[in-house]
Image (cartoon, rainbow, N blue to C red):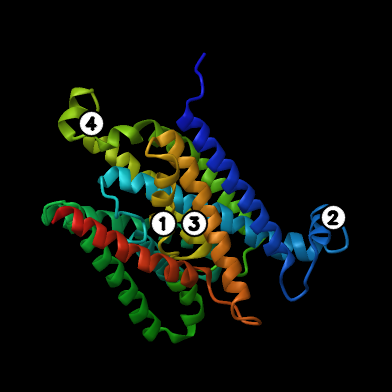
Amino acid sequence: MSTMTGTDMRALVVCIAVAVLIAAIAMLAMAVGAVPLSIGQVLDGIGGGKNAFIVTQYRAPRVVISILSGASFGIAGVLLQGALRNPLASPDVVGITKWAGLGAFLAGLMTPAAWAIWAIPAGVMLGAISGAALLLALGRSFGGGMTALALVGVALGMLAQALMQYVMILYPSRTDQSMVWLAGSVYGSTVVDVLALTLWLLACLPLVLLAAARLDAGGFGDDTLISLGMSPGLMRSGLILTSIALCAGSVASVGSMGFLGLLAPHAARLLVGSRAKHLLPASGLIGALTLSVADLIGRLIALPNEIPAGIVAAVIGGPYLIFLLVKEAGRHD
């Protein structure tokens, strides 16, 4: 019978504390709005009381989508960092979420509205895979180092955003829809969106569990992995594909949300260490908390208007990325 170590206990305490914070933010998010509610009224609405329609049809789906998408981005960031052995890697920094958003926008533009329910997720997946393929190909041609991958990823993300803006100029009538993918927002989330994302993440769960079992080995060099009987290319491809799958579901739900896949893994690593069994759940929970807080701030800071959660996350994540780049440059000097 295994005993719980001090590190295990610390990770458990951190995860419980973050989960409690998520629950508190969720309750607060369901209480604020055009019709302010007390916590008691929110609980009554969840139970089917007088405010059930407002709570369950409008506010709860938004809160749940924030939690699920944030957790997905956080876990995807851990897997991508492990696959690329790059602490600066994350789905948004290396451009994958921007390419996923571009794929979604193009799919919505080129297909009839009745096809959107499957065309947009397909476009998201195709865009994310295209972005990852370009990243790996170009990054390898520049030596495959951490700095090269980060810079190539930033350039690819800018290219995807530029392409989307060009398409917006060609088709100005679709600008409102495209802004969701550019900024990232949970506004207008519905019960159907929650169900679709939940089913997608459940489908991804076996891949995540398989990736988690291989994640700790991702830090070893290729020769060491081969000596252990593992294929480095196959293992890292599996981590990247799992990260892409997680990103695809979230981008389809909330758009091209920035910096969550970078912030959450780094915060989790500081709090619980780098062991996969601690890092993955902690990063998922911190990602969920970050997006929930970003959405709540965006709703409150400019009443009666709203600032998209992606913009709030970028305001937080941009300076943090600069800090990490400076820290990484100092380490190599």
**Location of mark 1 (residue):** 263
Picture quadrant of residue 192: bottom right
**Location of mark 4 (residue):** 231
In front: mark 4 or mark 1?
1
In front: mark 1 or mark 2?
1
Dot 1 or dot 2: first in sequence order is: 2
Dot 2 or dot 4: first in sequence order is: 2
| Residue type beneath disc 4 | Ser
Asked if the residue at tag 2 contacts the one at tag 1, i.e. Cβ–Cβ closer than 8 Å, the answer is no
Image x and y of residue 81, in percent: 32, 47
The answer to whether 290 appears left or right of 128 in the picture is right
The answer to whether 6 appears left or right of 293 in the picture is left
Above-or-below relation of 179 to 247 = below
**Location of mark 3 (residue):** 250
Cα–Cα span, label 3 and label 4: 29 Å
In front: mark 3 or mark 1?
1
Asked if the residue at tag 2 contacts the one at tag 3, i.e. Cβ–Cβ closer than 8 Å, the answer is no
State the mark number for residue 48: 2
The answer to whether 161 appears left or right of 152 in the picture is right
